[in-house]
Image (spheres, helix red, strand yellow):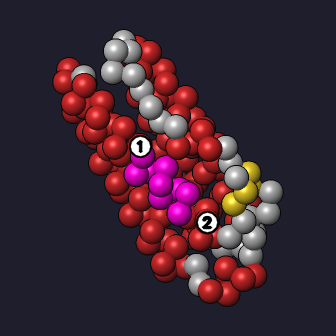
Amino acid sequence: MKLQTASQVINFALQLEENLFKLYENLAKSYPEKKDIFLSFARENKKNKTLIQRVYQEVVSDALETGFSFEGLDVDERFFQINLSQDDKLSSVLKKAQDIEKRIQNFYQEVALKSKSFLADVPGAFERIAKKKEERKQKINSLI
């Protein structure tokens, strides 16, 4: 799937954060011994979603939609395939979650890079979230 407009990129990012929110809420129910950390990840995804929405509403205008393109930003439908089996061991689930976070982090870094020359707020927001994804991957790694 090709994403070209800011609206497409923002909507895709919002869906990613919503999917992760649901994933971590489900993991909190499935693995009560790690409930607190999974719920903290879910809350962070909700904050990321709010940040992305706010940056878009405050910064991106109709002029941006018609004058700026994320040309060449190609994403795979796999971003939406965040399914974990209920019978997976916790270590397997955590490795899958780490992979998901890495894919999303790479996407956010590419969005930041492609928009850097146009606006400071958009790449700044995605860079901050990408950095949080790196920190989260390290937290997940410490749980494995």
The vertical placement of 118 against 80, above or below, is below
Q: Amino acid at mark 2?
A: Gln
Q: Position of residue 82 (x, y in %)?
A: 47, 36
Q: Which residue is mark 2?
A: 8
Q: Does the magenta stretch mainly form a helix, a strand or a loop?
A: helix
Q: Amino acid at mark 1?
A: Leu
Whole-percent x and y of residue 60? 58, 79
CA separation in Å, label 2 and label 1: 18 Å
Q: Residue furthest right?
A: 72
Crowding around mark 1 (Cα neighbors within 10 Å: few <14, some 14 to 19, many 20+) is many
Q: Residue at x 55, y 57 (%)?
A: 12
Dividing the picture into quarters, in which one does residue 115 lie?
Answer: bottom right
**Is residue 100 in view from this perspective?**
yes
Q: Position of residue 132 (x, y in %)?
A: 47, 44
Q: What's the mark number on residue 20?
A: 1
Extent of the magenta region:
11-19
